[in-house]
Amino acid sequence: MVRIVPERDLLENIALDLRALEDVERGFAELAAGNATVPPIMMIPVPALEGEVDIKSAFIQGLPHLAVKVASGFFRNPERGLPSQSGQMLVIDAETGFLVAVLLDNGYLTQVRTGAAGAVAAKYLAPQKTEEAGVIGAGVQARFQMRALALVRNIRVIRSFSLDGDEVRDAYVRDMERELGVKVIKSSSVEEVVKESSLVVTTTPARKPFLKAEWLHPGLHLTTMGSDAEEKQEVEASVAGAVDLLACDLRSQSFRLGELRSALAAGVISETTPVVELGDLVLGNHPGRTSDDQITMCDLTGVGVQDTMISIRALAVAEEKELGVTVS
Amino acid sequence: MVRIVPERDLLENIALDLRALEDVERGFAELAAGNATVPPIMMIPVPALEGEVDIKSAFIQGLPHLAVKVASGFFRNPERGLPSQSGQMLVIDAETGFLVAVLLDNGYLTQVRTGAAGAVAAKYLAPQKTEEAGVIGAGVQARFQMRALALVRNIRVIRSFSLDGDEVRDAYVRDMERELGVKVIKSSSVEEVVKESSLVVTTTPARKPFLKAEWLHPGLHLTTMGSDAEEKQEVEASVAGAVDLLACDLRSQSFRLGELRSALAAGVISETTPVVELGDLVLGNHPGRTSDDQITMCDLTGVGVQDTMISIRALAVAEEKELGVTVS
């Protein structure tokens, strides 16, 4: 018997909340403790349509299920009036290999678990007194990252910059002010956002860096979550060399797909540069930020343990509330 | 809207027939023509339970869909009264990346497409007058491989050897005699099967070779489909060196996971040994068997193009007959 859970049920029942944060924290902790197996991402390119299907997974010892996530990004879809991104998760019994559920989340759970990773980064790396935050981009993750931040810091102001049109930017301001009860300012430049904020999250699919090292300042934490492919880059390579503490979700991935890739390629960092994984922060193996003056950076590429953790939560809720349909 | 198709509907509507053979032939042809992208298999090991989840996929240019197959093998399952193998296929729109269907085939479509690959091998490599065939193993693929052979050769006799108990072996004889209308003989050794047959298929999960090169004889075709992992081996390494023509489904996989892996490790063949891929036989780039006296061997490891082809067929039938349920 396989449970099929449609998107609307997941939207209604799974939120980016402290539970999601805890789940994703645990996923990173298990990874750092050596209890997780994360195979390299499987990529199926469809170049003629600027498309790609990516598959992520992770097995975590001792947990009842593992997830296999199949996520698509087809960047000509908007020409047909369709969203670029879609996806779903298969939840598999880790004791028998049998399929237990298909979560037809259409990418929603990925948004939640990606936001949660941003919350983990902010929890251990952002200055305690972060009140002014900045975000580059005005899309879905620009929202999730600020929701995530609000879980771990008392923010008062969000400065937002994006290349989107006024309508999108105004919607961002309106929605986030209402949702988080904070002041949201449309900034006129990335420079302004960086200089005025204690925490900045970059959330764009940029292929050319737009954030300069010269704008960094003491007491800044920077989370870069846009780059998850070899051709992407949001921050100048020199940024990674200008921070006091460099962190990431999974070294092997960040060095291959994240901002650390371009920093490595530029010779700013090397394979042996100390880079703390989030799991080591969660486990207390590394203290994280130790003074308000440090400049810290966390590079997120998205790890299968996040998918496995969020899908285990979603399955538990779906079973408890009997969401979706079962097929045998 | 996603169509969910349960196993029973697939069992009733998709068979190992000439259409399946044609589909799989086309998959191999597209692969050989350079029109298919086949990423390396993604493997998620669960060693404590002798388990593994494997993911295969292939994108074939010009076809409307691609499949992502998630297949599990958990070899402690029989201790709980459950089958070791399970699996399902996701069918994805190759133009948008959206999920179109989930085929809950529980591994059935894999059996069909694996049988069909055996039929392709036999079609181009078995002597035309193959009347006496042999099969090692008495499981599901021992059945599918002989069904497959019956599509392309007029067989009269099947010699069967396996290490299974009498009940399983007798069931094999009874079922195959009834289904194929041929005589099925329980042989007392692998040696006897090989020596008396023009075509032999090995279908076991053996980790130690049981088929010796000294038993090969002119006019024999051998298909090895059991080894699909580094630790598996059905035939002595020297077998690959003792045949006139060596074929496989996908060189890069056979050299890594098939019988060609152990032959390579033993130094019997090298990376540059000529090995014909099935697609080159289908396309006529290679003539295949050119005389009744040749000894030929085809090593099958299972390729994503087979999954994509069979799932496209299954989807078409499911849509036409409105099988399963749709979830939106």
Image (cartoon, coloured by chain):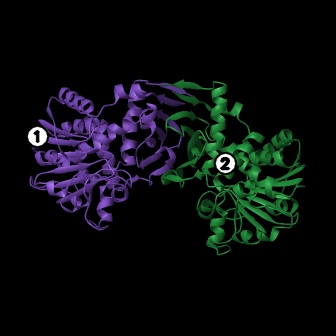
Chain colours: A green, B purple
Please, what is the three-letter code of the amino acid marked with disc 1? Glu
Amino acid of disc 2: Gly
- Read off the chain for label 1: B
Q: Would residue A143 be found to the left or right of residue A268 on screen?
A: right
Q: Contact (CB < 8 A) between labels 2 and 1?
A: no
When asked about the image quadrant of residue B257, the answer is bottom left
Q: Can residue A11 be seen in this snapshot? A: yes
Residue in front for this viewpoint, A203 or A41:
A41
Q: Nearer the viewer, residue A170 or B86?
A: B86
- Work out whether A63 lies above or below B179: below
- What chain letter is assigned to the residue under label 2? A
Query: At x 63% / y 28%, what residue is drawn?
Result: A319
Quarter of the N terminus of chain B within the rendering:
top right
Q: Secondary structure at mark 1?
A: loop
The crowding category of the residue bearing disc 2, from other C-alpha atoms within 10 Å (few below 14, some 14 to 19, many at least 20), is many
Q: Which residue is mark 2?
A: A27
**Category of crowding for the residue at label 1, using alpha-carbon neighbours closer than 10 angstroms: few (below 14), some (14–19), many (at least 20):** some
Residue B131's label in the rendered image is 1
> Residue A8 appears at what percent x and percent y?
66, 30
Is A223 positioned to the left or the right of B309 in the image? right
Q: Residue furthest bottom?
A: A267
- Looking at the image, residue A120 sits to the left or right of residue A84; the answer is right
On the image, the x and y values in percent for residue A180 come to 85, 42
Q: Which mark is residue A281?
A: none
Question: In the figure, A128 relative to A172: above or below?
Answer: below
**What is the C-alpha distance between the residues marked 2 and 1?**
58 Å
Tag in front: 2 or 1: 2
Q: Is residue A162 visible?
A: no
- State the residue in front, A187 or B236: B236
Q: Secondary structure at mark 2?
A: helix
Residue at figure coordinates x 71%, y 50% from the top left: A117
